[in-house]
Image (spheres, grey):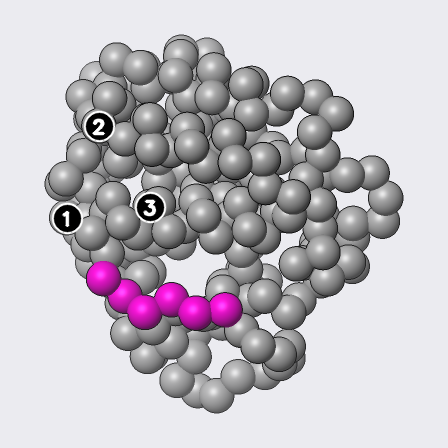
Amino acid sequence: MNILLHETQPFSNFELFSKYSQHKKVVIEACEHYQKRSLRNKYYILTSQGILPLAIPLKKGKNNKMPIKDVRISFEENWQKTHLGAIRAAYGKSPFFEHYFDEMEIIFLKNHTFLFDFNQNALEFLLKKLKCNIEVKESTSYQKHYSEDTDDFRHHLWSPPTKTMNPTWKYIQSWCEQGEFYENLSTLDLLFSTGPDALFHLLKFSELK
């Protein structure tokens, strides 16, 4: 397939990011309607207590079925402080935390009005730090079906983060016992843990899937 099409996500999991290496171009669906119970406003990290979901709160109202670019972030609570504190507690001692945290923090402190803009900023950050050179565009109209050269993952049910034992592919994660590995966390986990080798690990993962 030449084109990868998928929904917007904040700090996507590495199952999705591993697919970037298998395509020549990525299209982010910008003309769909928001769907609840998805990864459009959620990502997962690994803490001392296990897997932690971090959700970006949305303004109250009928977000479901609202055009994705119109979905607004809520600032009734200081969710940025909560997310940044959780990320620091989880990865503060990871080998490459100091290399990336400050620049990542800026994304949270921009106070984006719209969820889509936050997600795009997060995607740009990951692509830059992974040194992933691939063309990424937004869709300009909604199409239910695409041509055969497009891999459509807009409604894919992404595997939830899970703990596995002695997998064929892994990297050293914080908070893991010997032989343990947590799959499908946010790509932040991979970045903080492996730094400049993150892209190599994504390529290895894509070969096994």
Report x, y in % for residue 187: 35, 40
Which amino acid type is shown beneath numbered disc 2?
His
Which residue is depicted at the point 61% across and 24% down? 79
Which residue is depicted at the point 68% across and 39% down? 73
Answer above or below: position of 125 versus 31.
above
Q: Which mark is residue 99?
A: 2
The boundaries of the magenta stretch are 133-138
Q: Quadrant of residue 18?
A: bottom left
* Residues under numbered marks 3 and 2 in contact, where contact means CB atoms less than 8 Å apart: no
Q: Quadrant of residue 185?
A: top left
- Decide which of 32, 205 is in the foreground and name it: 32
Which amino acid type is shown beneath numbered disc 1?
Phe
Residue identifier under label 3:
126
Which residue is depicted at the point 65% across and 43% down? 113
On screen, residue 66 versus residue 117, left or right, reads right
- Decide which of 72, 153 is in the foreground and name it: 72
Crowd class of label 2 (few under 14; some 14 to 19; many from 20; radius 10 Å): few
Crowd class of label 1 (few under 14; some 14 to 19; many from 20; radius 10 Å): few
* Whether residue 39 is visible: no
Q: Residue furthest front?
A: 110
**Mark 3–mark 2 distance (CA, rounded to whole Å):** 13 Å
Which quarter shows the C terminus? Answer: bottom left
**Mark 1–mark 2 distance (CA, rounded to whole Å):** 18 Å
Q: Earlier in the sequence, mark 3 or mark 1?
A: 3
* Whether residue 114 is visible: yes
Crowd class of label 3 (few under 14; some 14 to 19; many from 20; radius 10 Å): many
- The magenta stretch spans residue 206: no
Report x, y in % for residue 78: 64, 20
Q: Earlier in the sequence, mark 3 or mark 2?
A: 2
Secondary structure predominantly adopted by residues drawn in magenta = strand
On screen, residue 13 versus residue 95, left or right, reads right
